Image: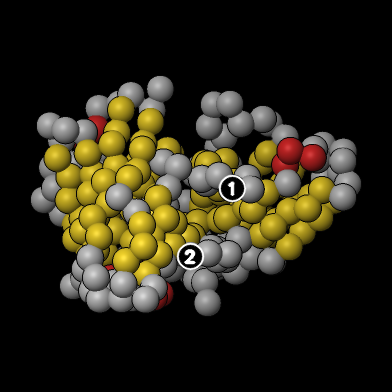
């Protein structure tokens, strides 16, 4: 059981906009930054969004992050086939004193 | 270019030991906290342990406390994870990751991972 809750799957067609939610509590998302990681099939995770809504250099602006209260979202616009991957949210948890991850969302591009 | 290259994974029997290594390059290794994050087959990500720049502080997830030891050698730009009393549930790909900020969930670079399989 993950500390942060994500839907196990999401899907969309090329060109569509999809969002992936991440629900937490006051001890994690409610009081700390949220991070998003993309894991393409058979590869290591890669930082996609940091500090709620910042993109590392090289990450397309099709990817955006937001946070409100104890929830966060990752939005992907102009969906492409190469976006098919697992996406994980993460945040520090003040109660557990560890970085907590969501269970991951498998995005399928139909 | 930042590079993290893990090694040392393999098949080990329950109760056995294994030492993972992570060779870092392309950045000033001694300036960063470093972490180990693992992923069981078909499962999500789980933070395992981290270590401060000078090795003076180390933290572990509860499930590995007393069995795993994280260490680093800044002269060799290397991070280690000594794993003892291994259990089937420790089976996972272990990733070495650089921390972008302390006490966050901010891992800005990851290695390719090394697979640890605990089985008889």
Vertically, is B27 above or below A87? above
Q: Can you say whether A5 is above or below B100 in the image?
A: below
Q: Residue at x 22, y 49 (%)?
A: B80
Q: Is residue B35 visible?
A: no
Q: Chain letter of disc 2?
A: B
Toward the viewer: B44 or B116?
B116
Badge 1, how many Cα within 10 Å: few under 14, some, many 20+? few
Q: Position of residue B98 (x, y in %)?
A: 35, 41
Residue at 11 percent across and 50 percent down: it is: B56
Which residue is tagged 2? Answer: B40
Left or right of A46, for residue B37: left
- Tell me the SS state at disc 1: loop
The label on residue A42 is 1
Identify which residue is drawn at 25% across, 76% down: B15
Label 2's element? loop
Which quarter shows the N terminus of chain B?
Answer: top left
Q: How is the image coloured?
A: secondary structure
Whole-percent x, y for residue B11 in the image:
36, 62
Decide which of A14, A23 is in the foreground and name it. Answer: A14
Q: Chain of mark 1?
A: A
Label 2 environment density (alpha carbons within 10 Å; few <14, some 14–19, many ≥20): some
- Is residue B49 in sight in this rendering? yes
Q: Are marks 1 and 2 in contact (CB under 8 Å)?
A: no
- The image's mark for residue B89 is none
Identified at 17% across, 51% down, the residue is B71
Work out whether residue B96 or residue B88 is closer to the camera in this orientation and state it: B88
Q: Residue furthest front?
A: B120
Marks 1/2 same chain: no
The quadrant of the image that shows the C terminus of chain B is bottom left
Q: Position of residue B6 (x, y in %)?
A: 35, 43
Question: Measured from the top left, where is residue B106 in percent x and y?
Answer: 42, 46
């Amino acid at each position: 059981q993950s500390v942060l809750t994500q839907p196990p799957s999401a899907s969309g067609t090329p060109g569509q906009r999809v969002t992936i939610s991440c629900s937490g509590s006051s001890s994690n998302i409610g009081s700390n930054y949220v991070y998003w990681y993309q894991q393409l099939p058979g590869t290591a995770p890669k930082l996609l969004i940091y500090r709620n809504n910042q993109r590392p250099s090289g990450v397309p602006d099709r990817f955006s992050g937001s946070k409100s209260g104890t929830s966060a979202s990752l939005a992907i616009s102009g969906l492409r086939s190469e976006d098919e991957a697992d996406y994980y949210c993460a945040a520090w948890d003040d109660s557990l004193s560890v970085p907590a991850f969501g269970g991951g969302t498998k995005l399928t591009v139909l | 270019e930042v590079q993290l290259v893990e090694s040392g994974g393999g098949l080990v029997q329950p109760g056995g030991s294994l030492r993972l290594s992570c060779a870092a390059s392309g950045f000033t290794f001694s300036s960063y906290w470093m972490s180990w994050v693992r992923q069981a087959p078909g499962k999500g990500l789980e933070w395992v342990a981290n270590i401060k720049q000078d090795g003076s502080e180390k933290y572990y997830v509860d499930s590995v406390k007393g069995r795993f030891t994280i260490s680093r050698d800044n002269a060799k730009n290397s991070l280690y994870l000594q794993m003892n009393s291994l259990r089937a549930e420790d089976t996972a790909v272990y990733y070495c990751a650089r921390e972008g900020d302390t006490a966050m969930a901010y891992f800005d670079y990851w290695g390719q991972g090394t697979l640890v399989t605990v089985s008889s």
